[in-house]
Structures are given as C-alpha cells and as structure tokens.
Image (cartoon, helix red, strand yellow):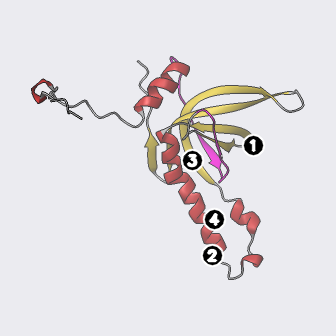
C-alpha cells in the first residue's frame, strides 16, 4: 500500500481561532432565539435536591423551586446546568450527608429532614410558560425561569447572554 505525500507548505498556519466560551453555544442557540428583546428578571428562589434531566439536551435540567408560596421551574441549559451541579447541588448534597453522618444508626436518622434540605439562590433569567396535557387529557401549565445567571453563597455562575 502506497502512502500519499503531504505537502506541509500548504497547511494554514495562521493564528488559531479564539477559544469559545462554554456559555456561547447556549447563548446563541437558546437565549438569542427564544428571548430576543425580552428583559431579564431577578429574584430569590428556594430549591432542594430534586431535579430532572430534560430531553432537550444531555446536560439540560429542570429544578423545582418556590418563590414565596408559588411553585415554579428553573431551566438550566448546557454549562449553566454543570455549574449548578458543581455549586448548589453539591452544597445541598453535602448538607444532607452531614445530617445523616451525625447519626450513629441510620435507622434512627431523621430522613424527612435530610431529604428536605433547601437553600436560597438568587437567579436571573427569562420567564416562559409551558403548557401540556396530562394523562387525563387536562391542560396543565407551569412558569419556567430559564436561568442565565445565579448566585449561591456569594459565588456567581453563568452570564447574561449577548443577544445580537
């Protein structure tokens, strides 16, 4: 088998491309398409350990939250979901583990307290209503906050998208 000769003098040796931010893809493909021209909303929400993966993307998550006594969903996409796992979810998991490790015998543990750990997070993002039919054919709806930036324990993650 003969190998083809490669002429290395024809290879492009110009400067490498600028490194892309991990948020850039989500900013362009989700925020700029869906929320162009809308204003951001900021508030403090209470979240727990519950979460579910969305079928939209591998890393995308929906987190149930409450604002006062109103239930909402936080939607985190791409790198923002990974940041949530590394900060908020890790903090809540550590708190739950601490509660359970404080008990010598896990049969005597207060599982409701351990599973019910919550924290407050300041979030900034865009509102969207989601509608669907449930199993009984009845229309349901929920308010979703598509999170662009959040702050937990003084650590800010994410960024506001550039919507050019």
Q: Which residue is mark 3?
A: 121
Q: Nearer the viewer, mark 4 or mark 3?
A: 4
Name the residue furthest bottom. Answer: 104
Asked if the residue under mark 2 is in contact with the one under mark 1, i.e. CB atoms within 8 Å, the reply is no
Of callouts 1 and 4, which one flags the residue occurring earlier in the amino acid sequence?
1
Q: Is residue 130 above or below residue 72?
A: above
Marks 3/2: CA distance?
25 Å
Q: Is residue 136 above or below residue 61?
A: above
Q: Is residue 6 above or below residue 111?
A: above
Marks 4/3: CA distance?
17 Å
Q: Quadrant of residue 27?
A: top left
Q: Which residues are magenta?
A: 35-56
Which secondary structure, mark 1? loop
Which secondary structure, mark 2? helix
Q: Which residue is mark 2?
A: 101
Q: Report the disc number at residue 69.
A: 1
Q: Nearer the viewer, mark 1 or mark 4?
A: 4
Left or right? Give the position of 79 relative to 49: left
Q: Report the disc number at residue 96.
A: 4
Asked if the residue under mark 3 is in contact with the one under mark 4, i.e. CB atoms within 8 Å, the reply is no
Residue 46 magenta-highlighted: yes
Q: Position of residue 163 (x, y in %)?
A: 44, 21
């Amino acid at each position: 088998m003969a190998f083809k000769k490669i002429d290395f003098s024809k290879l492009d040796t110009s400067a490498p491309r600028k490194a892309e931010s991990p948020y850039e893809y989500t900013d362009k493909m989700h925020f700029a398409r869906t929320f162009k021209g809308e204003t951001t909303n900021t508030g403090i929400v209470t979240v727990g350990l519950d979460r579910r993966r969305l079928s939209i993307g591998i890393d995308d998550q929906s987190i149930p939250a409450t604002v006062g006594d109103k239930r909402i969903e936080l939607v985190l996409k791409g790198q923002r979901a990974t940041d949530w796992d590394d900060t908020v979810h890790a903090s809540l998991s550590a708190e739950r583990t601490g509660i359970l490790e404080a008990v010598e015998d896990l049969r005597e543990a207060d599982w409701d307290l351990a599973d019910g750990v919550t924290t407050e997070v300041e979030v900034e993002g865009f509102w969207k209503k989601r509608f669907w039919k449930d199993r009984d054919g009845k229309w349901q709806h929920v308010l979703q906050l598509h999170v662009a930036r959040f702050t937990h324990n003084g650590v800010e993650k994410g960024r506001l998208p550039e919507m050019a």
